[in-house]
Image (cartoon, rainbow, N blue to C red):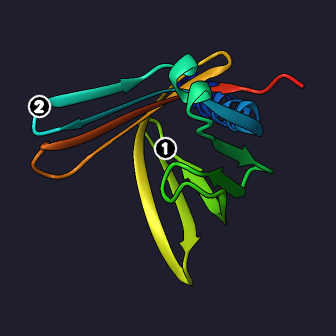
């Protein structure tokens, strides 16, 4: 009986994890960006981002490959390609920037078609929260 319960638990966990990975596949567009430096918060809503023509798209092509397209770093659209994986609490993107692979680890929350990604430096003086909505087209 214990073996059966353990087996069912493992199968359910695998199905839920695998299902959540499939939910990630698609294009996600930024709808809110909050940057906090030394306690000073700058929040950009979807309207602010649109008014300033700012773009940040995450394209999860499959259960391994990702592309990022954004003009928020330099003002021009830049595209990086790489891989992604997730654990219960973290989403990791490994992207190539200017010939170097950079690992970006985010805490994430996924609710239906909204994902919130959070990062900070070790001292907590710099924090970013980026909210994306899945493109339904």
Given residues 67 and 83, the one toward you in this image is 67
Spot occupied by residue 136 in the image (x, y as percentages of width and height): 84, 22
Please tell me in which quadrant of the rendered image residue 29 appears.
top right
* Image coords of residue 13 (percent x, y): 60, 30
Vertical comparison of 66 with 38: above or below: below
Assign a secondary structure to mark 1: loop
C-alpha separation, residue under disc 2 versus residue under disc 1? 29 Å
Task: List the residue tagged with mark 1.
Answer: 87
Which element is circle 2 on?
loop
Q: Is residue 104 left or right of residue 61?
A: left
Q: Single out the mark in the foreground, 2 or 1.
A: 2
> Mark 1 or mark 2, which is nearer the start of the sequence?
2
Q: Is residue 25 above or below residue 111?
A: below
38 is higher (above) or lower (below) than 69 = above
Q: Residue furthest right?
A: 137
Which residue lies at the image location 41% right of the left edge and 44% below the top edge? 106
In the visual, does 81 lie left or right of 117? right
Give x and y (percent) for residue 32.
Answer: 49, 24
Q: Residues within 10 Å of mark 1 (few under 14, many from 20)?
A: few
Q: Quadrant of residue 47?
A: top right
Q: How far across and down, in percent of the image, does residue 4 sit? A: 63, 26
**Residue drawn at (80%, 50%), measured in percent from left and top?**
61
Quadrant in which residue 7 is drawn: top right
Which residue is label 2 attached to?
39
Residue placed at 54% from the left, 73% from the top? 97
Q: Quadrant of the N terminus?
A: top right
Position of 54 relative to 78 (above/below): above
Where does the C terminus fall, quadrant-wise? Answer: top right
């Amino acid at each position: 009986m214990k073996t059966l319960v353990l087996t069912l638990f493992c199968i359910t966990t695998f199905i839920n994890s695998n299902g959540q990975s499939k939910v990630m596949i698609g294009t996600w567009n930024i709808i809110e960006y909050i940057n906090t430096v030394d306690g000073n918060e700058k929040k950009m809503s979807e309207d602010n981002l649109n008014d300033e023509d700012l773009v940040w798209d995450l394209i999860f092509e499959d259960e391994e490959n990702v592309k990022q397209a954004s003009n928020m770093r330099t003002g021009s659209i830049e595209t990086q390609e790489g891989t992604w994986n997730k654990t219960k609490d973290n989403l990791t993107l490994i992207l190539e920037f200017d010939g170097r692979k950079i690992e970006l680890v985010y805490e994430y929350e996924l609710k239906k078609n909204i994902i919130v990604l959070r990062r900070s430096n070790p001292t907590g003086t710099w924090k970013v929260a980026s909210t994306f909505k899945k493109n339904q087209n």
